[in-house]
Image (tube, rainbow, N blue to C red):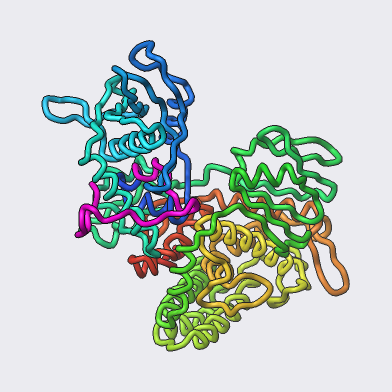
Amino acid sequence: MIHRQPHSPQEPLPPCDEHAMLQVMSLRALLYCERLFYLEQVEGIYVANDHVYAGRRVHEEKLPLDDETPERRSVKVSSQHWGLYGKVDAVRRRDGQWVVYEHKKGRCRRGENNQPEPWPGDRIQAIAYAVLLEEELGQPVPQARIRYHADNVTAFVTIDEAAREDLRQAILRARRLQASCQRPPVTENERLCPGCALNVVCLPEEERLQKQATPQKPKLFPADRQRETLHVVSRQASIGRSGESLLIRTEENKTRVPIQQVDSVLIHGYAQISTQALHLCAAHQIPVFWLTAGGKFIAGSTHSPGRVQQRIRQYQALQNSDIQLRLSRQLVRAKIESQLRYVLRATRGEETRRQRVIEHIERMRECLAKTTKAHSIDSLRGLEGMAAKAYFASLPQLINSRVPESLFPNGRNKRPPKDRFNCLLGFGYALLQSLVLRSILAVGLEPAFGFYHRPRSSAPPLVLDIMELFRTTIWDIALLGSINRGQWDPDADFQVAASHVWLSDSGRKKAIALFEQRLQESYRHPYTDRSLSYARIVELEVRLLEKEWTGCPNVFAQMRIR
């Protein structure tokens, strides 16, 4: 239903330039769900799901109409007065007058005596096309018809003054939403959400968790990612385009990867990528990132609309010192608690090993207890630093005595790493950094606007903030497990120099495989109480962070290891 605002029925439509004109189909989204309209038309977020693809096929199949009357298909129409543009499915002459036809793949609404009726969004869309066509032709268009193919019935829409006024109200409401920086609330009609293409962006179920007396597990957010990351490691590799696929050439072979299977491309070292391949990635909104052979992030390229409203909200929220401190407390508590729980879990049942780290465990416990009383971000940074020092001091005790001594850490060192363990640790953190950056960009936030880390040149602050949640859970645990299983060759997997240690080609491939395998593993997220892959959990946490300043606080950084 249209949310009417008190106004004169003759309230003029606001002036509209060509850059602010609305697509007619956006009005259908408006009457379906105002948040859907806002996400698509204001923030520029589009996701095609099975329902969207099925609807496209209906229009591509050139379905026949009722009889052999001549018609015009896919008629483009626009109006500066109404501020609308779009493409009519079909226009036909009936009894000497023009009639607009729209095709819908689904079922119609049923009225009295089970008569077919259009859904509100379909009706306003048909009215808009009829009014625009009328202006285009300079002739009256008294009727529109909507063909529902699932029922094989036609619903009729009369184009009268009441219909024109409904159209006017819809446009006025759309303009008000366009002028706002605040997302509309989640729809109260939960039945609309499963079929919505943007439910993975909106997260309506996660937002309703705080308001429901008996919360139910969210089901709409995918448990695993549908695509995979393409890592290009070979130094002589080149990435080109072949149709709708990426073609990776190395000295040994050629590999063709359909673009629909890729969620991002990571180029390690000096492999080449063609302009045509970059265009293909951009067209499918697939980011491309460049890393050094040692894993340091260099640059990234991604296709993303401005997302101006999202970033205005983010900037305004993260300028608030109270919000900064609250989020920082949640973040630091989550990080220290994960580190503490891992050390406790790794030494459970081994009294000798537990006694060797008991001092470090007590120090982490002490820091964790003090986080709730910290009154500044600087205090939290100090507590995090002391806890991290105790955590890394305990890691050598978590490595089996059978492991070669050269794989044990010699303290925590980086840039450049001076031992094999820190080389592996830093490389995994670089992969994690690129994953977090991709997730932030996919959500539409600005990586440079953080709340905990100070701005610096090496990495965007928000990326460093989110990384703190996952250093232990995604990489540290996986890395120590692989070391204890004897998966690393101290000679073949590393290149050792006087002042630093790098991974060899074989070492990089092992590290990437270990990282990607970890992302596919599932874990029950404590807020949603659902098992999700770690790759999806990273994106979920970024989306929950955005909800901290869009009306759903205290949902971020609940991720913990058991």
Residue 103 occupies which quadrant of the picture? top left
Asked whether, in this view, residue 542 is left or right of residue 288, the answer is left
Q: Residue at x 25, y 27 (%)?
A: 156
Nearer to us in this view, 371 or 19: 19
Asked whether, in this view, residue 31 is left or right of residue 261, the answer is left
Q: Quadrant of the C terminus?
A: bottom left
Residue stretch rendered in magenta on the structure: 1-28
32 part of magenta stretch: no
Image x and y of residue 229, in percent = 63, 48
Image x and y of residue 346, in percent = 54, 66
Above or below for 174 versus 246: below
Q: Residue furthest top?
A: 68
Please name the predominant secondary structure of the magenta segment in the image: loop
16 part of magenta stretch: yes
Residue 45 visible, this orientation: yes
Asked whether, in this view, residue 190 is left or right of residue 440, the answer is left
Tally of numbered tags = 0
Q: Residue at x 27, y 28 (%)?
A: 143
Q: Residue at x 30, y 37 (%)?
A: 127
Image x and y of residue 44, in percent = 48, 52
